[in-house]
Image (cartoon, helix red, strand yellow):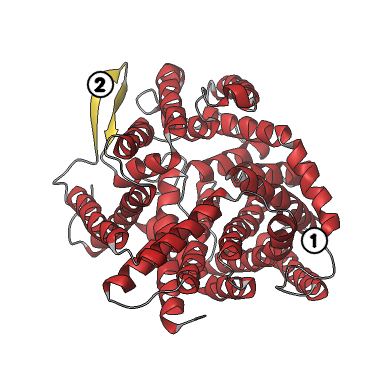
């Protein structure tokens, strides 16, 4: 059995759900769960519970469309970055930027599928896991995982509603170092995300939190050092760029792979059609950047060629080899390249990060889905067509959720409710490039943490000692998040490790509980905001 109405309709619904959830959660924490496995488990769980037959093709359709929405949620970071530097994009600007770069990213996935799946099969760990989950779930007709997601989502949703009603605390301070309160946030999402990210990344967040305590006396906000985001921005920039340099072989391999493109692309679209469509879309993006963002034509071309093609190629290979997609650092690289050509204006400079973010995330998740489909013998044309078809819907969702969030919660460099570490990194870098005056001690701390980022990334590049080190990504984001959020990541990693080891819970059950934490908090957080706007009950 191939495409069915239930799989496509379910895919659209799951895409909307995952896009709404991640649009909110990426601004809260800077991390997202794209959701192919979550979407597949929800789809199979529901229809098995309804005593309906499900095929691997149907489950893969739901996973492909759901993960498209999940990854698209990441683009709200660029909307937030603009707002943080005092630029409010219009609806038209947001829609044009996200849709045009999203279409380009889907087109870029076609040659990358040919290069890194058909010709040279990279590990694609998440794609492999998704294929195994679909295969095992469909074969066993297991309703257990769907039930776990349903009941735990209701439980975690209830937690957020109690917090919105002020009947349950959002966080608790257990100890005070100087002026800094240290405690935990009672957050299903942070605990669940910690379980998915693992113990090493969790340790990274703890180190980031500890460093915030140490530097707090030297910031202009000792009681809330995470609001002094400059050290974290410096660390994220230097550690990310150093990691890219260390992966020079990946870059060389990615470029070398281009010679393998032949007269076809693995059966999705003839090369001449692919080249022609990509050129047309690239020209449309350049025009949009020129007339809606003030980006000179030459710089628009640079953004497309460097960010949309070259850096995208490198990032996708890195994602296929290591599961790490360096899109945050790639956005900063694109900003830096723009600055070298004279683009220090905040609107023009941040647009470079927007092009990178828009043109990378969909490519990465679609390649991951295409690998899963390749393993399950699903027609890749079908997956590409479905992701392209769902783009307009999830673009509207991401813009709508951002408008809603920005109307209910202040999105700024001083904000606590929505920490948005990725947006702060891009916004902070644009301010530096623009020559804005920095607060006292900001430059000195940026030097210190910038050097620290280089050193730790170099150490992390040594495979023999990497497993003993905290994650640099965790440290960098931990330097921008509230301390309680960072500690949640670590506690979540420990809890899920105990569940797996002590209580012998399988990977699918762990993933289902984590998925429920993500969905439950997103649903609760968004509904709380809606109730606040409606005046039904206060959140503050």
Q: Please state which of the two labelled residues, at mark 1 or mark 2, is closer to the viewer.
A: 2
Q: Quadrant of residue 223?
A: top left
Residue furthest to the left: 167
Which numbered disc covers residue 389? none
Please name whichever residue, 251 or 531, is drawn nearer the observer in this view of the structure.
251
Q: CA distance from mark 1 to mark 2?
A: 55 Å
Q: Dot 1, how many residues are within 10 Å of its Cα: few (below 14), some (14-19), or many (20+)?
A: some
- Say whether residue 391 is visible: yes
Residue that appears at 35% across and 35% down: 497
Where in the figure is residue 117, as x and y percent of width and height? 68, 58
Which numbered disc covers residue 175? 2
- Say whether residue 403 is visible: no
Mark 1 or mark 2: name the one nearer the start of the chain.
2
Residue that appears at 42% across and 32% down: 199
Q: Quadrant of residue 282?
A: bottom right
Please name whichever residue, 122 or 307, is drawn nearer the observer in this view of the structure.
122
Where in the figure is residue 157, as x and y percent of width and height? 24, 55
Q: Dot 2, how many residues are within 10 Å of its Cα: few (below 14), some (14-19), or many (20+)?
A: few
Where in the figure is residue 359, as x and y percent of width and height? 65, 58
The residue pinned by badge 1 equals: 297
Where in the figure is residue 149, as x and y percent of width and height? 29, 58
Dot 2 lies on which element?
A: strand
Residue that appears at 23% across and 25% down: 174
Dot 1 lies on which element?
A: helix
Please name whichever residue, 331 or 106, is drawn nearer the observer in this view of the structure.
106
Q: Is residue 125 left or right of residue 417?
A: right
């Amino acid at each position: 059995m191939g495409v069915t109405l239930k799989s496509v309709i379910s895919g659209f619904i799951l895409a909307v759900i995952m896009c709404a959830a991640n649009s909110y959660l990426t601004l809260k924490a800077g991390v997202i769960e794209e959701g192919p496995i979550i979407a597949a488990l929800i789809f199979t769980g529901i229809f098995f519970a309804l005593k309906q037959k499900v095929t691997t093709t149907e489950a893969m359709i739901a996973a492909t469309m759901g993960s498209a929405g999940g990854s698209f949620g990441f683009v709200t970071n660029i909307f937030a970055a603009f707002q943080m530097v005092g630029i409010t994009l219009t609806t038209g600007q947001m829609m044009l930027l996200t849709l045009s770069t999203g279409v380009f990213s889907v087109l870029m996935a076609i040659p990358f599928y040919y290069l890194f799946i058909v010709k040279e099969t990279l590990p694609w760990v998440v794609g492999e896991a998704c294929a195994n989950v679909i295969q095992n779930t469909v074969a066993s007709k297991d309703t257990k995982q769907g039930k776990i997601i349903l009941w735990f989502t209701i439980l975690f949703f209830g937690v957020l509603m109690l917090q919105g009603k002020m009947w349950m605390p959002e966080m608790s301070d257990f100890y005070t170092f100087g002026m800094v309160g240290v405690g935990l946030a009672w957050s299903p999402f942070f605990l669940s995300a910690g379980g998915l990210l693992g113990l090493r990344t969790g340790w990274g967040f703890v180190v980031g939190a500890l460093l915030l305590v140490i530097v707090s006396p030297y910031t202009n906000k000792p009681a809330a050092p995470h609001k002094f985001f400059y050290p974290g921005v410096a660390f994220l920039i230097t550690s990310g760029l150093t990691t890219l340099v260390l992966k020079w072989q990946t870059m060389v391999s990615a470029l070398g792979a281009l010679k393998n493109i032949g007269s076809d692309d693995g059966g999705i679209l003839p090369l001449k059609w692919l080249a022609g469509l990509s050129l047309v879309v690239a020209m449309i993006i350049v025009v949009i950047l020129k007339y809606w963002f003030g980006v000179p034509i030459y710089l628009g071309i640079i953004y497309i060629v460097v960010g949309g093609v070259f850096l995208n190629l490198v990032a996708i290979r890195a994602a296929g080899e290591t599961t790490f997609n360096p899109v945050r650092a790639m956005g900063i690289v694109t900003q830096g390249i723009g600055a070298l050509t004279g683009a220090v204006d905040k609107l023009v400079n941040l647009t470079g990060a927007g092009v990178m973010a828009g043109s990378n995330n969909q490519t990465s998740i679609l390649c991951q889905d295409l690998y899963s489909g390749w393993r399950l013998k699903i027609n890749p044309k079908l997956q590409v067509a479905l992701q392209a078809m769902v783009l307009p819907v999830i673009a509207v969702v991401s813009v709508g959720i951002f408008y809603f969030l920005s109307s209910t919660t202040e999105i700024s460099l001083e904000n606590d409710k929505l920490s948005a570490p990725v947006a702060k990194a891009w916004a902070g870098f644009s301010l530096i490039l623009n020559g804005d005056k920095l607060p006292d001690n900001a430059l000195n701390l940026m030097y210190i943490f910038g050097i620290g980022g280089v050193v730790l990334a170099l150490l992390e590049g040594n495979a023999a000692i990497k497993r003993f080190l905290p994650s640099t990504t965790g440290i960098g984001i931990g330097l921008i998040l509230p301390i309680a959020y960072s500690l949640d990541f670590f506690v979540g990693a420990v809890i899920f490790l105990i569940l797996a080891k002590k209580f012998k819970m399988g990977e699918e059950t762990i993933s289902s509980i984590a998925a429920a934490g993500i969905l439950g908090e997103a649903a609760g957080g968004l509904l709380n905001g809606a109730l606040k706007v409606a005046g039904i009950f206060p959140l503050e």
